[in-house]
Image (cartoon, rainbow, N blue to C red):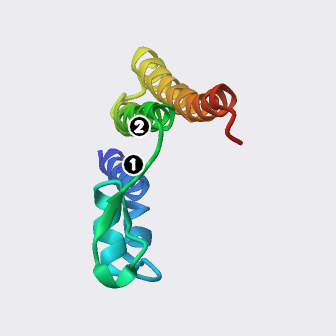
Amino acid sequence: MINKIKRLIAVTSAGLLLILGGVPAVAMAADTPLITDSTCQGADLNLADDASSNTCKTSTADAGDNANTLVARVINIFSVIVGVVCVIMIIYGGFRYVTSGGESGNISTAKNTILYAIIGLVIVALAQFIVKFVLAKATGNS
């Protein structure tokens, strides 16, 4: 019983490290840009040519670039959601593996859960590359 609890704590700790591993890197940003640059970025605006005016001008991108940006954003959001679900499923599969009690049916179910979650992560990663490649070829951008 004690070994099961130790394993459960180890799996939970490993899962939390996977999920929260990138948080310190985000908090330690190197240089902060000017506040006028930041305000213009939030609305897809550019700083006006006259920097002393502190005003933003709208970007002059064509509709093709807007469509590409929209598709890329949708794919990125979808990828993040699927990635989070896959990590949660890996943690869940690890939990089921630890609590299987040595029963072969439960062990194989837990292993399949982990395996399919990892396959899902690989597919999401490859989807990112495929979408960027197709968008680059379709629009002629390099």
Residue for point 64% across, 25% down? 138
Q: Quadrant of the C terminus?
A: top right
Callout 2 environment at 10 Å: few (<14), some (14 to 19), or many (20+)?
many
| Residue drawn at (28%, 72%) of the image | 55
Amino acid on which disc 2 is placed: Gly
**Circle 2 — which element?**
helix
Crowd tier of the residue under label 1, counting other residues whose Cα lies within 10 Å: few below 14, some 14–19, many 20 or above: many
Which label is found at residue 39?
A: none
Question: How far, Cα to Cα, is label 2 from label 1?
Answer: 6 Å
**Is 35 left, or right, of 86 in this rendering?**
left
Mark 2 lies on residue? 94
* Mark positioned earlier in the residue sequence (2 or 1): 1
User: What amino acid type is highlighted by mark number 1?
Assistant: Val
Res 25 seen here: yes
Q: Are dots 2 and 1 in contact, CB under 8 Å?
A: yes
Looking at the image, residue 2 lies above or below residue 118: below
Q: Is residue 39 left or right of residue 106?
A: left
- Pick whichever, 114 or 21, lies toward us: 21
Rendered view: 134 above or below 1? above
